[in-house]
Amino acid sequence: MKDDNARLRAAIDKLRVPIYIKDPQGRYLYANELACELLERARADILGRTDAELFPPELARAMQAHDQRALTGREPVIVEECVRLAGRPEMNWGLSIKQPLFDEDGAPDGVAGLTIDITARKRDEHELVALKNDYAAILQALPDPLFVLDAEGRCLSYRTPSEDLLAAPPSLFMGRRVHEVLPPAEAETCLEALREAARVGHSTGKVFRVDAPGGTRWFELSVAPMARSAGEPQRFNVLSREITARKQMEQALQERESLLRAVVDNTPVEYWARDLQGRCIMQNAMTAAHWGDLLDKRVGDSGESAPVSADWAESNRRAYAGETLHKEVEYEVDGERRVFQCLVAPIRVQGEVMGIFGFNQDVTERKRQERQIHELAFFDPLTGLPNRRLMYDRLEHALSTSARRGTEGVLLLIDLDHFKDLNDSHGHDAGDQLLVEAGVRLNACIRQGDTAARLGGDEFVVILEDIEGVAQANTIATRIGEALARPFHLRCGKDGERVVQHVSASIGVGAFGRGELSAAELLRRADTAMYQAKAAGRNAICFFDPAMQAAVTERATLHADLREAIRSRQFELHYQVQVDTRRRPVGAEALLRWRHPHKGLLAPGGFIELAEETGLIVPIGHWVLETACRQLARWAQRAQTAHLRLAVNVSARQFRQPSFADEVRALLESTGAPAERLKLELTESSLIEDAEAVIERMQALRALGIRFALDDFGTGYSSLAYLKRLPLTQLKIDQSFVRDVMSDPNDATIARTILALGSNLGLAVIAEGVETEEQYDFLAAQGCRDYQGYLFGRPVPMEVFEAALAQAQG
């Protein structure tokens, strides 16, 4: 028995699997040779030690927990563990099997265990997951529907980026064979693709058609068999790409080719073609009538005079060399010298010259009448404006220029409303007068380089190139509408009776510059928009592009709402406290808010830009100043608030008003507000235009006691030499620098620089946007004395502000 145990132990020692035994306290009682190798320790150095002494802490804790599970549960524990052993660095994962041991009384007596290296298996699992992820990513990136079909053409599953790409709803094809869904011929095409894929490993290029409610749709199949296990039925991945557009283009190309041949055979010009050997391989009837039958003949065989043959030979030589020639020549026809416009060009196949062809067109009559034709062809004889033909030419040029430069433009189609009534009531002479004057007004409304043209009747076109967005297009269209709405003073009848006629205009707008668009299509779009304008009640502007129309409508609505807000006094001021180094309130900044009847309370970011552009900022700014002055006057009457200053933002457009200084002086007088408590905050953009007038205006207001703060300092580009001339009292560190002052060294440096600059120039400095104690501590350490931001208070209505002020002072 003892010999058997010895042999068993010797065998276990030699097994190439680490095997060990621990006592109930986790001390190793036995470790075979491989276990010792993996730990790179002698057996005597392992026995009696615990996992905590032999393994990294995290792994040791996990191993001890698994031992306890085995002992407590009284059954084996099998776990996967991430291991790192010095004796086997290539081993990353092990499958540990822990068997609880019991003494004769059934009490836990230890744990026997072994660990199997499963690193390769785990690596395979990870690679399989990565492969699945790659496959999923490929499927996600496919732009076309992907179907899984069996060998009978039955749809087992599908995946598509969009249901619109499917030829039919899924309910019509899921679980059905193609013969149940498609006509026989189309179904057979699909099955042939499956058979070919099964036979050669793939199938591409098979095309079938579906007659859908919206018209015929064409699809091209790419098929590949899917991997399968023994005994599994064959399945196929089928990629279905819609090629309807391509088929339509192919059909259109065939039609154009047929049309071209018909044109060549029937056009009243001479046409011919020659091969590389110089033989004539094609001619039309007019060529044969003029020169005789040239087929199979070279230039030298034509029988023409030496000068003509030499001219032909030289033109052909240059065409064979790849050059396209346009020239005018004179030939004698029936004893008369006539002018021909000739074209000789190479015939290229895949970039290689395979022959030459030519056209000869008799332009004698055109040359005789060229000047008269030009005048009649390109200008409207009534208004002197470009006519439809010249308009098309300029529109094509505008489209190509826009595409080349990446700029935008619009086409305005203008129809005079009720123009027929004028002709019916006062005659065509009065109508002509109105059309002439309308042309004059159109030209006065557009910029140099734009085009105003008359299409005919009472329709005009305006081409605007290189515009700056929807707003500018709408502004010019509005200007045109307003100009045409002014009274027309006409003379009617034999006695020249004066008549005042009022008309309006329906204007359709089509945009170009954001994709390929033909002149005809653009005109159709503008025409559609114009009729929409008429349908909307006439005297209107309508944009074809829904996005532009939406933007214009939104802007117009906001503009109207702003006007109503001014009239109905929908604005209010909120106040944000400004504090000193001891966090005592020293004043506030008045911040504009709009109490919109439908959108609620709006911050300035949603409407100030439009107010600036439209000039409404001037009356809005006046209201803000008046309200702020009245508040200062109320504060001045109470000892608790008499020391407070109130900062008011003044827009560049408002400040540049010549009467601004007089306006502020009048407000101070009418409200009784103390001027020394009013602080006007200006941005650098307010100061850089018309510098001398700005300085004069500021000095006049400073003489009243008003203080000036330079808002958003550091974000503009004004020179210090210029700024030091301004009667400023305070610089305001922009919140963009304060926000990251603790994390961005550049912002910290800028903040320190502004504080130092203010100190050197004798200017106070206030930091806005202070939101954290860390920002406050940093700025205070750098010498900042005034602060504003959420750390001290948010912008609030006056009643809330004064309540907080009273609490702070109480």
Image (tube, rainbow, N blue to C red):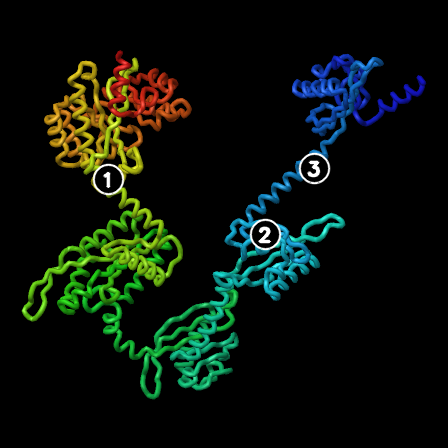
Using the numbered discs, state the Cα–Cα distance from disc 1 to disc 3 in whole angstroms: 67 Å
State the SS at label 3.
helix
Q: Pointer 2: what residue?
A: 146
Q: Pointer 1: what residue?
A: 562
Please name which of the two marks, 2 or 3, marks the residue nearer to the observer: 2
Which amino acid does the dot numbered 3 rest on?
Asp
From the viewer's side, name the closer residue of 96 and 302. 96
* First of labels 2, 3 by sequence position: 3
Q: Is residue 243 above or below residue 761?
A: below
Q: Quadrant of residue 733?
A: top left
Which amino acid does the dot numbered 1 rest on?
Leu
From the viewer's side, name the closer residue of 560 and 297. 560
Q: Tell which residue pokes out farthest to the left in this image.
A: 495
Q: Find residue 690 and report its horizontal and vertical position in percent.
A: 18, 37
State the SS at label 1.
helix
Using the numbered discs, state the Cα–Cα distance from disc 1 to disc 2 in whole angstroms: 53 Å
Q: Are marks 1 and 2 in contact (CB under 8 Å)?
A: no
Whether residue 412 is visible: no
Q: Pointer 3: what residue?
A: 124
State the SS at label 2.
strand
User: Quadrant location of the C terminus?
Assistant: top left
User: Quadrant location of the N terminus?
Assistant: top right
Whether residue 666 is visible: yes
Q: Are marks 1 and 3 in contact (CB under 8 Å)?
A: no
Q: Find residue 391 and report its horizontal and vertical position in percent.
A: 28, 63
Residue at 57% across, 53% down = 171
Q: Tell which residue pokes out farthest to the bottom in this image.
A: 335
Q: Quadrant of residue 808?
A: top left
Q: Find residue 627 and report its horizontal and vertical position in percent.
A: 18, 28
* First of labels 1, 2 by sequence position: 2
Q: Find residue 15 and report its horizontal and vertical position in percent.
A: 83, 26
